[in-house]
Image (cartoon, grey):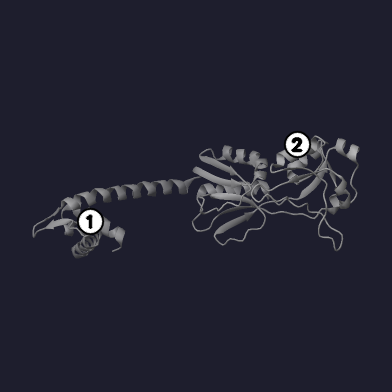
Amino acid sequence: MDHFGALGAFVQAAHTRSFTEAGRRIGVSSSAVGKAVARLEEELGVRLFHRSTRAITLTAEGSLFLERCQRIFAEYEVAKRELTQAAGKPQGKLRLGLPQLGMRLMPHLIAFQQAYPEVELELEFSDRLVNVIEEGFDAVMRIGEVDDSRLMMRKLNGYSHRLVASPDYLSRRGVPSRPADLSSHACLRYRYPTSGKLDPWPLVMKKGQDTLELGQSATSNAIEALLAMAEAGQGIACLPDFFIEDAIAAGRLVPVLDRYISDHRTFSILWPSSRQPLPKIKAFVSFMASRLT
């Protein structure tokens, strides 16, 4: 009999005041119940029952232990009910970690809320590399390749960067025809908030060239700020294609140097592989994959 079974045998013996009746109720012999109780007494260092040839009665320590055991079994029953309900439909809190770029996914996240109203979203937007398991995230959406055997992964649509500027800026400063021209332009750069490093622009270099001087005008750790400055004619920005498609379609921004860009970045959903995914996680992964693959 395992430890949990021994606790159950003790509780039944306490309720029936009989090892024989306790054994009948849980399907074991009276001697098995007696041995389980004896092991508990030895482990706890107290006597749980007064024994006689006719009956058993709880000691003061046994009464206290019975109260604790009843709470344990009550909590166990509540947990079983909750998990049974959870297995039926997506519900409960879903804690998600997303990069700052994930703000552009809000229409999809809102649509998920509307499709699954019993799931409560808890969103954390950050470009830091969160620890999915240790920080208690149900799932994260991450950019780039991931090599972590503790995580399951579903790849979504990737994206690329494009260099863009406003028509007004290009009319004033000219249209760059090759990457080297960028040294004389106002370049709007993204700076990673965690490392402080500038995001390199994915430009194809000349053979033997590994660096490119950019005429830096402004930096920001918020892509929305770079977009606003680019649309206001303050310079050329390197931004994700899905982030600027509306501005390009409306004529507020114009792509430049497209043929010199070599860039593709992976976007994935990750969740812990150490446990069976709950319905809320399965629903979220399937929903986002249906929209972004």
Instruction: Judge the density around disc 2: few (<14), some (14-19), many (≥20) Cα neighbours within 10 Å.
Output: few
Q: Position of residue 197 (x, y in %)?
A: 70, 51
The answer to whether 209 appears left or right of 99 in the picture is right
Task: Out of 80 and 202, give the one closest to the viewer.
Answer: 202
Instruction: Judge the density around disc 1: few (<14), some (14-19), many (≥20) Cα neighbours within 10 Å.
Output: many
The answer to whether 103 appears left or right of 116 in the picture is right
Q: Position of residue 228 (x, y in %)?
A: 75, 36
The answer to whether 50 appears left or right of 158 in the picture is left
Q: Position of residue 172 (x, y in %)?
A: 90, 37
Q: To which residue does mark 1 refer?
A: 10
Task: Label 1: state its secondary structure.
Answer: helix
Q: Is residue 70 above or below residue 117?
A: below
- Whichever of labels 2 and 1 marks the residue nearer the N terminus, that label is 1
The answer to whether 42 appears left or right of 239 in the picture is left
Q: Quadrant of the N terminus?
A: bottom left
Q: Quadrant of residue 46?
A: bottom left
Q: Position of residue 147 (x, y in %)?
A: 61, 61
Image point 19% across, 65% down: which residue?
Answer: 31
Image point 59% across, 53% down: which residue?
Answer: 270
Task: Out of 19 and 61, give the one closest to the viewer.
Answer: 61
Label of residue 44 in the image: none
Q: To which residue does mark 2 refer?
A: 228
Q: CA distance from mark 2 to mark 1?
A: 70 Å
Q: Single out the residue that lies furthest toward the left.
A: 53
Task: Label 2: state its secondary structure.
Answer: helix
Image point 31% across, 58% down: which residue?
Answer: 4
User: What's the residue type where badge 2 is placed?
Assistant: Ala
